[in-house]
């Protein structure tokens, strides 16, 4: 939620309260971690890539969608949320089954979890976000 505040000079400013994620301390890498990251960035393994740097196949006019997905996947808040297991697709599926929902119901949070996992598994090969696209079509009646 946003809150307006009047500053000392008469201007107003708004602040956004952060209630979605628990407050975590900022990560400050050690000297050894900095060196390892620099080494991996300049000399990645031939079979694997740098986590998060992975292309998406165009599925026929999905280049804009791929651009948006890359932006979301590499956004620190979104990335940390899904890599931190705050939305686990396996637990979510079990909860939906327990609640008696139809097995073909789509959870876009689960699809995003799958997409983030794919991007950060370390492979250099591009992959197809077909599951995310299908889930979006299935969950949006107007598409």
Image (cartoon, rainbow, N blue to C red):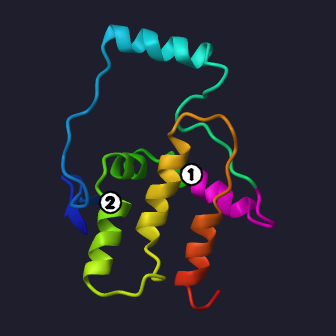
Tell me what residue is drawn at x 66 percent, y 63 percent: 65
Residue range (magenta): 58-70
In this rendering, position of residue 4 left or right of residue 92: left
Q: Which mark is residue 10?
A: none
Q: Is residue 62 magenta?
A: yes
Picture layout, residue 37 above or below residue 80:
above
Q: Nearer the viewer, residue 5 or 63?
A: 63
Q: Which structural element holds mark 2?
A: loop
Q: Position of residue 105 (x, y in %)?
A: 45, 82
Q: Is residue 66 visible?
A: yes
- Quarter of the image holding residue 49? top right
- Quarter of the image holding residue 25? top left
In this rendering, position of residue 11 left or right of residue 129: left
Q: Is residue 11 visible?
A: no
- Quarter of the image holding residue 124? top right
- Tell me the quadrant of the picture where the C terminus can be found: bottom right
Q: How many marks?
A: 2
The residue tagged 2 is 87
Q: Position of residue 54 (x, y in %)?
A: 63, 40
Q: Crowdedness of circle 2 by 10 Å Cα count: few (<14), some, many (20+)?
A: some
- Tell me the quadrant of the picture where the N terminus can be found: bottom left
The residue tagged 1 is 71
């Amino acid at each position: 939620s946003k809150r307006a505040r009047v500053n000392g000079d008469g201007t107003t400013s708004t602040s956004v309260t952060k209630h979605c994620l628990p407050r975590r301390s900022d990560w400050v890498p050690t000297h050894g971690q900095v060196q390892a990251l620099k080494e991996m960035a300049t000399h990645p393994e031939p079979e694997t890539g740098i986590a998060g740097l992975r292309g998406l196949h165009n599925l026929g006019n999905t280049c804009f969608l791929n651009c948006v997905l890359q932006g979301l996947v590499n956004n620190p808040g979104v990335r940390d949320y899904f890599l931190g297991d705050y939305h686990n697709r396996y637990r979510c599926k079990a909860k939906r089954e327990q609640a008696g929902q139809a097995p073909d119901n789509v959870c876009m949070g689960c699809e995003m979890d799958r997409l983030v996992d794919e991007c950060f598994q370390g492979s250099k090969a591009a992959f197809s976000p077909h599951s995310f696209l299908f889930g979006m079509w299935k969950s949006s009646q107007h598409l």
